Image (cartoon, rainbow, N blue to C red):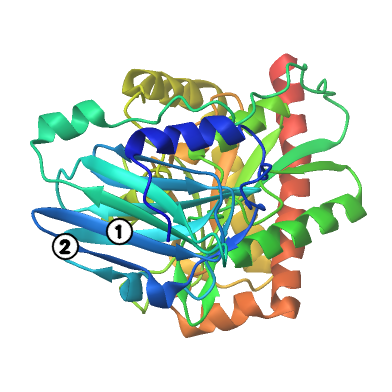
Amino acid sequence: MSSMSRLGLAVLVVLCLGGTARAEGTGFTGLARLDAADSRIVADGPGIALRLALSQGVPWRVFTLDGPPRLVLDFREVDWRGAAATELVATDRVRGLRMGQIRPGWSRMVVDLAGPYPLDDAGLGIDPESGRAELRVRLGRGAPERFAAASGVPDSPGWDVAPPADTAPPPRDANGPLRVMIDPGHGGIDPGAEEGGLTEKALMLVLARELREALLRAGGFEVILTRDTDMFVSLERRVALAHEAAADVFISLHADALTDARVRGASVYTLSDSASDEASAALAERHDRADLLAGVDLSGSDDVVAGVLLDLARQETQPRAEALAQTLLEVFRTEDIPVLGRPLRHAGFSVLKAADIPSVLVETGFLSDARDRRNLSDPDWRAGLVAALRAGLARWHAQDRARAGLVRQ
């Protein structure tokens, strides 16, 4: 390997390559494979050393985030297949590790640190003969104040998400089709629940596509998905997408896993700042950790604004969302979709905080239960669930328009 570049050069590499995945004379081609057998995260003196062996060099950057302390590495782009956190991590100074796509063409690794380990050095070395690359990162040990002061997403040109298009959302027509925003939970670097070889992110994307097809085929619906590929979408962005599309209704699809394997069946959640029970509160907390797990900087989040949104939702939209939840559950029971003993629940899910859009979160089942796993893996069973969701949305839309007419009169 060639000699390692210093940390300052890490930023230089990003600046030189800009928004491209290829550069003249570098041998960088957009996709590298991780050699998991030759990669490791270990204790190094008072700190931590990370070594990633790659099939070739790619543009990259590294930074830390606080609250809790995390190391984040971005790439354009790395194939993580065959890599497992249990094989890469060999120190208790690391509490967790995730790898995956953060958005199309972008890969991310997030390392949960057991304490404040500031970034001391980082560099990428490339073997001129084979083209193989080795990324080395060294973290020291420092005071929490030092770590916090040095943390944050760097201002690296070409790495930011493109701003949303400055276009007005399509106009709403009170008598037109129902515009439905379907939100497949999780995605990309955030797999959601994982049980029995299944991942929540993959199952919910399949279900969302099937529901979209059924709604469009039935007529009377316009459908938009928050994601149509295996990519990460932040919770804030999911709500923003619903606003940009001027959606009439927002439905988020999930299939979690619980430690209590006896829990099974579908349930529907609406927004509340107080959970209906402890299990719902824990579920909402896990859902809202998605951004943190994906290495999103949450230091600028505004709890006051969130409180205002909750108040607006209660006053303007919450009765309509609760009516939607009730209607969906009525159809589920009619169509023999298994539901929980108390299937109507509420909690403070951030993804439901669109103040002017009726929003519900449907737990389609639990991957921790063998029966629910079988059902969600079965295309025929999912077809029944999709039919129930479509019928519920259509019934609610008719009732909602009728109620609106009564209010206007």
Which labelled disc corresponds to residue 43?
Answer: 2
Q: Position of residue 232 (x, y in %)?
A: 55, 48
Q: Residue at x 35, y 23 (%)?
A: 300
In the picture, the quarter occupied by the N terminus is: bottom left
Q: Amino acid at mark 2?
A: Ala
Q: Disc 1 marks which amino acid?
A: Leu
Residue carrying label 1 = 50
- Asked if 283 appears above or below 220 in the picture, the reply is below
- Residue 29 at least partly seen: yes
Say whether residue 124 is left or right of residue 114: right
Residue placed most toward the observer, 32 or 234: 32
Dot 1 lies on which element? strand
Quadrant of residue 230 in the image? Answer: bottom right
Q: Nearer the viewer, residue 125 or 30?
A: 125
**Quadrant position of residue 273:** top left
Going from N to C along the chain, the mark reached first, 2 or 1, is 2
